[in-house]
Amino acid sequence: MSAGTVVLAGTVLFAAGCSTGGTGLRDGGPARTESVAKTGAPSSGAVEPEGASAAPFSPPVSGMPAKKVDPVELLKADPKVSSEAKRDLKPCTGKEYPVDVSYGKVTGGPAVDIVINVLSCADALGRGSYVYRADDGKYENVFSDERPPVYAEIDRGDLVVTKPVYGRSDALAYPSGEDLITYRWNGEAFTEQDRVHTDYSNVVDGGVAPAPAVSPKG
């Protein structure tokens, strides 16, 4: 991931102990979890967080939304999220969902945006990435990538999406390479600005280890 990543206060982070093995594959990170509220889905349009009508929405001053948002509730209520993604969105243990959430400015609006990454429970690989833009107390899905593996982050005002690349014989922990795609908000949608592909060496960690030395007998 980019060293310059600016990520403000993730509310719900789930850690699955998946090691990067030196290949650039993202680790799940430290665990910070919370209980999940009830779910419900509107038929269309922007997604309104539970209880949003009780208080007016105002731009935050500390990098967090004025009202706390339940990311699982947001995803399940969003008609733009695929039925397959919703079906797979289940807690790994208890009420802990495999969801990473970042808050920050990525669409140029007065309120912070929300970036949500859904991971797999078994290996912490990104299953889907979504960006929600605040609009008059509701959240609009303005970016979705449901082609795993994928992970999205905010980097200096841009949206940066990381996609590990696997060869036919690659182990899950050792992809052959990585695509790093930078998107920028043009006022209406995200457009691709840059794409960097990296091929990893197959002699470090993911390569075949040499056979152990054998001491001569006698």
Image: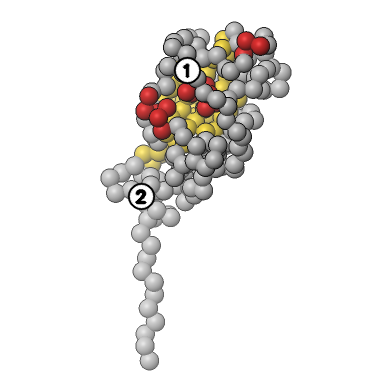
Q: Would residue 155 be visible to someone looking at this image? A: no
The residue at the point 37 percent across, 85 percent down is: 216
The residue at the point 67 percent across, 17 percent down is: 66
- Tell me the tag on residue 149: none
Q: Amino acid at mark 2?
A: Ala
Percent across and percent down for residue 45 are 46, 9
**Residue 102 higher or lower than 98, as above or below:** above
Q: Secondary structure at mark 2?
A: loop
Which residue does the numbered mark 1 point to in the structure image? Answer: 41
In the picture, the quarter occupied by the C terminus is bottom left
**Residue 48 higher or lower than 87, as above or below:** above
The residue at the point 46 percent across, 41 percent down is: 121
Percent across and percent down for residue 207 are 37, 56
Q: Would residue 127 be visible to someone looking at this image? A: yes
User: Mark 2 or mark 1, which is nearer the start of the sequence?
Assistant: 1
Q: Amino acid at mark 1?
A: Ala
Which residue does the numbered mark 2 point to in the structure image? Answer: 171
Residue that extends furthest to the bottom in the rendered view of this protein: 218
| Neighbour tally class for label 2: few under 14, some 14-19, many 20 plus, Cα within 10 Å | few
The residue at the point 64 percent across, 30 percent down is: 9
**Residue 106 higher or lower than 205, as above or below:** above
| Neighbour tally class for label 1: few under 14, some 14-19, many 20 plus, Cα within 10 Å | some
Q: Quadrant of residue 51?
A: top right
